[in-house]
Amino acid sequence: YGTGEYYLNNLLNSIPGARQLLDVKYDNEGNKVLQNQGRSTGSKILENMLLPGKLTDVNYSDSSTEAMRLYDSTGEKTQFIPTAEKKDITTDDYTPTTEEFNNYKRLLGENNSFGAAALMDSDFYASIDDYEKVKYLSDIYSDMKVIAKREAVPNYEIPNGYKKKMEIYDEFGIDGLVNYYYISKTSGGKDSGKINAISNLDMTDEDKGKYISMLIDISKDAETAYTWNGYEGVYSYYINNVAKNSSKVTDAEDIDALRQRIEAYANGNVSGSQNEMANRISAYVNGKKSGNTASQNTVLSIQNGTAQHGEDMQKMMNKIQAYIDSKNNQ
């Protein structure tokens, strides 16, 4: 406002036919916006006086309609399509021209429209409640903004929190992001949960192997499987080996609880006698595998008060984990 460009645009806007000389503008969903067709302010006032009841028809998109429904349901507002601003793409080294900003606004609007439609059309979206729908609509708009910036801003550096999602988007497109949301929500952050979630996706084993390789640190054995059979080999390795072996241990929750108790003991946060804690660990180890000398000696060191906190306790945890792994590999 107040610049020479602003006044020139106003002048062109007031001259019939000259509006075609103006830069094209876009709304929040990437649609072209019709500019003033040479009508002066006076003509608009006269029209309102002659036709005071005339209303402009508004056609809401599916995403806008859904955003309003969610507002009525939750009172939240982050699900509404965001508006592009020049500051989005202004950096210390780059100030966009009007044409460059309009291009960014078009990119962001098109991405927002496309991304919201893909999310709302997914089985994942249908399975979550309204508050979660607000969250994931907001997430898709944040991701779409990064994608638009990446294309519009010279030398744009993707923020760390978005790099993995951008890798998945580049490989699988918008459906990849929707799948990422599903995997993140259902996995609990655990590798085993991610593998299980990926196994439920409707795609080829090769693509499932790609997701696994992108979302977890694969083992050396999985790398060997990739060498022989590509990403399909990676997926086959985890489904036929890790998943099958882990099913031999039926008390995974007990194992996690045990780990938490060990950590609490190491930090001195366990109430009651130390022997009670040692007895629990001893019962677990001896009940799972008799004759495991290394684990039994570790437990005895706790019972005798010779185990130290810190590194020694971590070694003890590692030994118990090694035992669990050996149990799985039987």
Image (tube, rainbow, N blue to C red):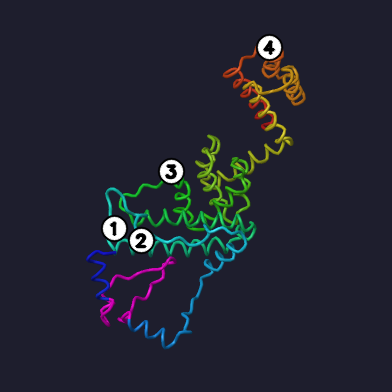
Which of marks 1 and 2 precedes in the sequence? 1
Residue 256: give x, y in percent of width and height: 67, 33
Q: Are marks 2 and 1 in contact (CB under 8 Å)?
A: yes
Circle 4 residue: 305
Q: Where 66 falls versus 323 (above or below)? A: below
Which of marks 2 and 3 precedes in the sequence? 2
Question: Closest to the observer: 167 or 156?
Answer: 156
Quarter the N terminus occupies: bottom left
Circle 1 residue: 96
Q: Where 263 falls versus 165 (above or below)? A: above
**Residue that appears at 64% across and 14% down:** 307
> Element under label 4?
loop
Question: Closest to the observer: 74 or 186?
Answer: 74
> Element under label 3?
helix
Hey, what amino acid is under mark 2? Tyr
Q: Residues within 10 Å of mark 4 (few under 14, many from 20)?
A: few
Q: Where 299 falls versus 145 (above or below)? A: above
> Element under label 1?
loop
Structural distance between the alpha carbons of marks 4 and 2 = 66 Å
Circle 3 residue: 160
**Residue that appears at 65% across and 41% down:** 243
Which mark is drawn over residue 104? 2
Which of marks 2 and 4 precedes in the sequence? 2
Quarter the C terminus occupies: top right
Hey, what amino acid is under mark 1? Pro
Structural distance between the alpha carbons of marks 4 and 3 = 45 Å
Structural distance between the alpha carbons of marks 3 and 2 = 22 Å
**Residue that appears at 34% across and 54% down:** 89
Which residues lie in the magenta part?
13-41
Which of marks 1 and 4 precedes in the sequence? 1
Quadrant for residue 15, please give it: bottom left
